[in-house]
Amino acid sequence: MRVFYSCLFYLLIPFILVRLIWRSIKAPAYRYRWNERFAFYNKEFPRNVVWFHAVSVGEAEALFPLAKQMLQHHPDAKLLITTTTPTGSARVKAVMQESVEHVYLPYDIPDAVNRFMRCFEPRIAVIMETEIWPNLFAYCGKNKVPLYIINARLSEKSANGYQKIPLLISPALTCVKLIAAQTQDDAKRFIAIGAKHEKVRMLGNIKFDVEVSNEIIEQGSRLKADLFGDRFVWLIASTHKNEEMIFLEIYKEIKQKIPELLLVIVPRHPERFGEVKKLCEQYQQTLVTRTSGEICRQDTDIYLVDTMGELKKFYAASDAAFVGGSMVPVGGHNILEAAAVGTPVLFGPYMANFKEIAEGVLQQDAAIQCRNKNEIISAIVALYLDPANRQLLAEKGKAFVRQNQGAITRVFKCLDQDI
């Protein structure tokens, strides 16, 4: 079955490259470093590396505290972090800088995987969340590389899909030493698709171990003072196509009830910065962008954060935050960063990717879920009119994060035996 999969992958390569070119129209970074996607390298890399793979920004952000802990305990270890997307690559370079090696993960074709394994000779392989690559896993097994899937999550939809190809997935999972699942439901789904029961453990979600330093809080306070003054700052984070217009449409109505309201928008993907800017202008809103370096005036309606890597400090500069990807059927995004910073959190109805987190935070009244425009309006106005309740919501959010921390320590103990 894996031979058929590999042949099919080879046949699809021209279409994959066309897709990279298409994506590079909006995100030019996709047209560079193709050699890495086939494991051709133009420099020498260290061998015997501790290898982590994080697909994109969200997985990378969750991984950083674990990678830093690994470096603290094993300062002589050589760490490699691979990603799939340019945005993930940029975050690895910005946060970890020269402390780790970084390349793109090669495509899951035998010759590329073989070159990758020969180049880095990993002593351990650690895959974040849901990535199952049959050839990569097989080569780890062949080379006796201890393979872990950490912070593992598997939706019911994905599990159903994997169950349709057991001859491909079950052999791949036999190469895995441990699957550290986020929840019991995730653990059950991995077992259902072929993982051995004894190889699956529920260790929690490492995203709860989000790092929020005093420096971030101080930077947020300075941002609010320097850029926003005494405005009521409502941050809309990680937005997707067709999502910004929802908030732009209700902005004028809320503005009548909150005269000092300022809407701060942070699009999820940098290639959409220009698109969102034009959209705001179409709605005839007075706009200031982060890259302009300008401060907000009293007549400024929208502040567009058209930079990467600053979301935490903008959370800290906000009076309330709505986490996007949840008003359109994307599946939601991580609400824990906003909660950990101490910002009152709101989100929409589409939270399939963070179902357990959404259920948990709502059970503790530590966030607000809004199903439509009217509920958004009511929630924001209520938070504005009741500062005490706003503060209580923020404190409950921080408490929810603290109560669920500790997964990184548990995962590290498992990995440490193979370092």
Image (cartoon, grey):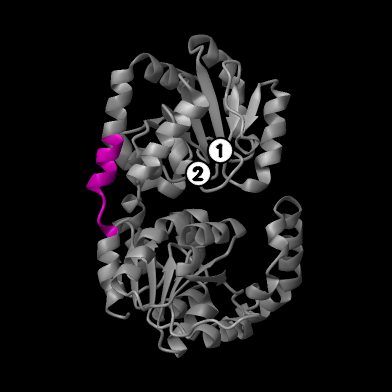
Asked if residue 270 is positioned above or below residue 157 in the image, the reply reads above
Q: Residues within 10 Å of mark 1 (few under 14, many from 20)?
A: many
Whether residue 103 sits left or right of residue 346 in the image: it is: right
Q: Which residue is mark 2?
A: 310
> How far across and down, in percent of the image, does residue 7 sit?
67, 81
Residue 212 falls left or right of residue 100: left
> What element does badge 2 sit on?
loop
Q: Please, what is the three-letter code of the amino acid marked with disc 2?
A: Glu
Distance, label 1 to label 2, CA atoms, is: 9 Å
Is residue 400 on the magenta stretch?
yes
**Residues in magenta, as a range:** 396-407
Q: Position of residue 29 (x, y in %)?
A: 68, 59
Residue 34 falls left or right of residue 399: right
Secondary structure mostly taken by the magenta-highlighted segment of the chain = helix
The residue positioned 33% from the left and 16% from the top of the image is: 386
Q: Nearer the viewer, residue 151 or 417?
A: 417
Label 1 residue SS: strand
